Image (cartoon, rainbow, N blue to C red):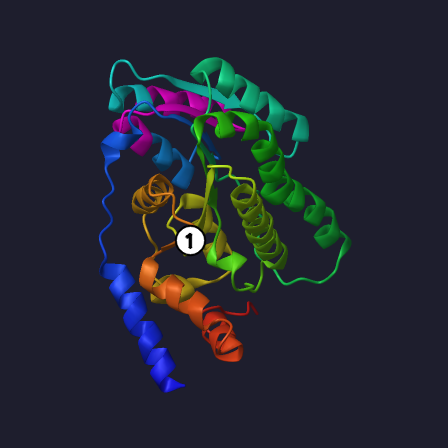
């Protein structure tokens, strides 16, 4: 048993130090759609792509913030770059089709679709209350169904360009997290849907890549505020938060390399997912030991 664990650890360490031949110049001229891009990781993804010479359309609910993101993309990117926005609420499934139509109209097609948006919800114990059940429908719509709809509408254009789908998920999509059970459920659902879709692509010879991004704690304003509001100061002290910019770059790099999955930060998240099935009780114990039950 311990030999297997040691071999796994060595393999993970080797994988951690391997350097891929990622060439940012290869992204120049690519047509990119980024959802959930008014703040946090999505905003930083848009800026990195702009610096690399890609054409970018950003989308979220907040139009005024999107205008600011587009303006900064113009400052960071080359003069010939194309940068647009489309304000849309991902709780409305008809909006997903409008986003893709706008992207194709503005950019002339889609090479990379980055699915990053989420519905942030307050942390809390699952009580099975009417409030729990009411919010569940909206979380499933925004955090899962909208991903499926966006992918479906974009698929003909991605097939035409041999493009890429990049799905921003979480450790919560590999190991269920306390205080956010429904959020975890939607992330698990993304793994299942896109895992099945990836296999269908291979079966029919479709050269569209799918990269699932398994992300740990990232120091976005919403994430840090939510944890503090729910009294998770111990977790914030013990677990260093990754920066949105570094996380965005890891996501872009993994997508450009057409990886099946990426893990960020690599070592800690990869080890947790590897040991999940071998020692589930131990992994869950370590996981929940980081959290504090509010009094």
- Image quarter of the C terminus: bottom right
Q: In this view, does 26 lie to the left or right of 176?
A: left
Q: In this view, does 51 lie above or below 282?
A: above
Q: Toward which corner of the image does residue 88 lie, by quadrant?
A: top right
Q: Is residue 42 above or below residue 284?
A: above
Q: Which of 233 and 263 is in front in this view?
A: 263
Res 240 seen here = no
Which residue, given by chain and number where applicable, does mark 1 sit on?
215
Q: Label 1: few (<14), some or many (≥20) within 10 Å?
A: many
Q: Nearer the viewer, residue 41 or 223?
A: 41
Q: In this view, does 3 lie above or below 122?
A: below
Question: Residue 189's spot in the image, x, y percent?
Answer: 61, 52
Q: Does the magenta stretch include residue 53?
A: yes
> Which stretch is magenta?
48-72
Q: Is residue 190 left or right of residue 78?
A: right
Q: Nearer the viewer, residue 82 or 261?
A: 261
Q: Is residue 111 magenta?
A: no
Q: Is residue 161 above or below residue 284?
A: above
Q: Nearer the viewer, residue 196 or 145?
A: 196
Q: Toward which corner of the image does residue 150 lie, by quadrant?
A: top right
Q: Which residue is drawn at 52% across and 44% down?
A: 202
Instruction: Identify the element where label 1 is drawn.
Output: strand
Q: In this view, does 221 lie to the left or right of 174?
A: left
Question: Residue 63's spot in the image, x, y percent?
Answer: 50, 22
Q: Residue at x 23, y 37 (%)?
A: 23
């Amino acid at each position: 048993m311990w030999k297997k664990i040691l071999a796994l650890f060595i393999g993970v360490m080797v994988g951690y130090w391997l350097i891929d031949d990622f060439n940012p110049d290869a992204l120049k001229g690519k047509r990119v759609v980024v959802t959930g891009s008014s703040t946090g990781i999505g905003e930083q993804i848009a800026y990195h792509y702009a610096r690399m010479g890609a054409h970018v359309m950003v989308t979220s609910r907040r139009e005024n913030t999107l205008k600011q993101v587009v303006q900064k993309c113009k400052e960071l990117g080359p003069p010939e770059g194309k940068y647009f926005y489309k304000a849309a609420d991902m709780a409305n499934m008809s909006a997903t089709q409008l986003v893709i139509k706008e992207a194709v109209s503005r950019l002339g097609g889609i090479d990379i679709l980055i699915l990053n948006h989420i519905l942030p919800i307050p942390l809390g114990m699952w009580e099975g209350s009417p409030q729990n059940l009411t919010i569940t429908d909206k979380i499933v719509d925004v955090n899962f169904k909208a991903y499926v709809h966006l992918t479906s509408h974009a698929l003909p254009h991605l097939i035409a360009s041999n493009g890429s789908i990049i799905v921003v998920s979480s450790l919560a999509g590999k190991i269920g997290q306390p205080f956010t059970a429904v959020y975890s459920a939607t992330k698990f659902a993304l793994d299942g849907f896109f895992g099945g879709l990836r296999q269908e692509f291979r079966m029919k010879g479709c050269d569209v890549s799918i990269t699932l991004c398994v992300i740990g704690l990232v120091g976005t304003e919403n994430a840090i505020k939510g944890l503090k509001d729910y009294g998770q100061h111990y977790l914030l002290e013990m677990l260093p938060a990754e920066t949105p910019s570094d996380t965005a770059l890891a996501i872009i790099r993994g997508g450009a390399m057409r990886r099946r999955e990426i893990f960020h930060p690599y070592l800690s998240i990869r080890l947790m997912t590897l040991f999940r099935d071998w020692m589930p009780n131990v992994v869950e114990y370590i996981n929940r030991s980081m959290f504090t039950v509010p009094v």
